[in-house]
Image (cartoon, rainbow, N blue to C red):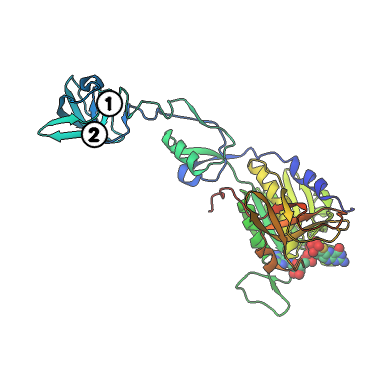
Amino acid sequence: MSLIPVEEAYRLLVEDARPLARTETLPLRDASGRILAANLASLRTQPAFDASAMDGYAVRAADLGDKAPFPSLRLVGESAAGHAFEGTLQPGETIRISTGAPVPTGADAILIQENADRRDGTVTATAPVAVGQHIRPAGIDFAAGTPLLTAGTVLTPGAIALAASGGHPAIPVRSRPRVAILATGDELVLPGEAIGPSQIVASNTFGVAALVREAGGLPLNCGIAPDREAAIDAQLTQAITEGADIFVTIGGASVGDHDLVGKVFAAHGVSLDFWKVAMRPGKPLMAGRLGDMRVVGLPGNPASSMVAATLFLGPLVRRLAGRPARPLYRRGVLAAPMPDNGDRTDFVRARIEPDGAGLPRIVPLSRQDSSLLSIYAAADALLVRPVAAAPAEAGDPCDYVPLTTLEPLAEHN
Ligand SMILES: Nc1nc2c(c(=O)[nH]1)N[C@H]1C(S)=C(S)[C@@H](COP(=O)(O)OP(=O)(O)OC[C@H]3O[C@@H](n4cnc5c(N)ncnc54)[C@H](O)[C@@H]3O)O[C@H]1N2
Ligand code: MOO
């Protein structure tokens, strides 16, 4: 298969993906950051009663008139939050009332305590009150049956509080896409494990799993498979059994004698959408389908696999999760001159420097070898250098891909 352009790969892998139909019901405290799966209407009216907005005295505004001196009112009881005054306020009467407490029948205004003299069972106003003053009418927030949240909403802290106020102890959310992640390679061990002289630590697995989580997916760890077709195939079979929506491999995607992922996919009947994208790093990216399951083969080099996962796997997970679409590229300006570019889109590890109200300045980092995780982790953006771009000057406009999320994280568990 020949190299395909980044845009074409994005279209094949991401753009036709539809949100998964699976939903689950979660207690509110576990639902933050998730996507609401159904419209939610209120089960109750809020507040359910006319409520005082201030601490003071419930009065009949007409009793006071609009000019001092104001007549003294007889203090006949109290309405506290959670403990209503049961009677009806008669002319010449007042009751003590707290913020949030029900306003008794007969009262039509709240005299704040700063404007009241209380002594010997009477209360005298020092300022007039208007009808309705400091009263929150029943249903001012929402009435029973009011639509509160629409399906597809990201459950922000505010949305969670609103669902609670509407009387919902648990709510339906979209299930997270299940993403099986398999590291491949005889050279790999887990961090902290005994390590041989020619071995390295499987780092990408952890980075890719974190990225999947941030995109709203549920990473399923398949561990490390040695460079044997049967071992990789067994993990593919297990991912299907476990109901994975995406099977991701890391490494073994290139052309070496031990790069077996493509062979295993072919033997298992994966229909390949593409293998190799005109990008640097991340060229030997593979994508296909096996029934309803998506299959993604990421390259092994650490920056290559993180860049490919950022550009394609993250957006795919977001789509399947039903998260709102967002543009892949943002606009910035170059902080340094860049040389011309060849026949692969270059994703240069870079830092974002905010520039007040203007577009952010994108600062390319000096070393770009695709094995360097220290550089990748120091970057917060990928500066995009298009295919065949002419040399560019500092100050020229550019596209970049942010590496950090500005959105609520999906629930961690
Ligand atoms: N003759 C050619 N050689 C290579 C080409 C090519 O076109 N022709 N492409 C190069 C490019 S570009 C990349 S990227 C790599 C990708 O190769 P693979 O996907 O087959 O990856 P491996 O060979 O298995 O590993 C490469 C490198 O990454 C390390 N690795 C693998 N898995 C992990 C992991 N989970 N965590 C950390 N590091 C990992 C592995 O040890 C190797 O050092 O191929 C080039 N070669
Ligand atoms: O794609 Mo390779 O990523 O150029 O190192």
Q: Residue furthest left?
A: 120
How packed mark 2 is, by other alpha carbons closer than 10 Å (few <14, some 14-19, many 20 or more), is some
* Viewer-proximal residue among 166 and 140: 140
Side (left or right) of 81 relative to 14: left
Residue 260, visible in the rendered structure: no
Q: Position of residue 370 (x, y in %)?
A: 76, 65
Q: Position of residue 344 (x, y in %)?
A: 85, 56
Residue 115, disc: 2
* Viewer-proximal residue among 47 and 300: 47
Q: Position of residue 317 (x, y in %)?
A: 67, 47
Q: Is 342 placed above or below 93 here?
A: below
Query: Circle 1 sits on which residue?
Result: 129
The disc, 2 or 1, on the residue closer to the chain's N-terminal end is 2
Residue 412, disc: none
Residue 101, visible in the rendered structure: yes
Q: Position of residue 289 (x, y in %)?
A: 77, 46
How packed mark 1 is, by other alpha carbons closer than 10 Å (few <14, some 14-19, many 20 or more), is many
Q: CA distance from mark 2 to mark 1?
A: 10 Å
Q: Residue at the spot x=74%, y=44% of the render?
A: 14
Disc 1 beta carbon < 8 A from ligand 1?
A: no
Q: Residue at the spot x=62%, y=73% of the render?
A: 193
Side (left or right) of 406 relative to 334: left
Say which quarter of the image contains residue 166.
top left
The answer to whether the residues at label 2 and label 1 have Cβ atoms under 8 Å apart is: yes
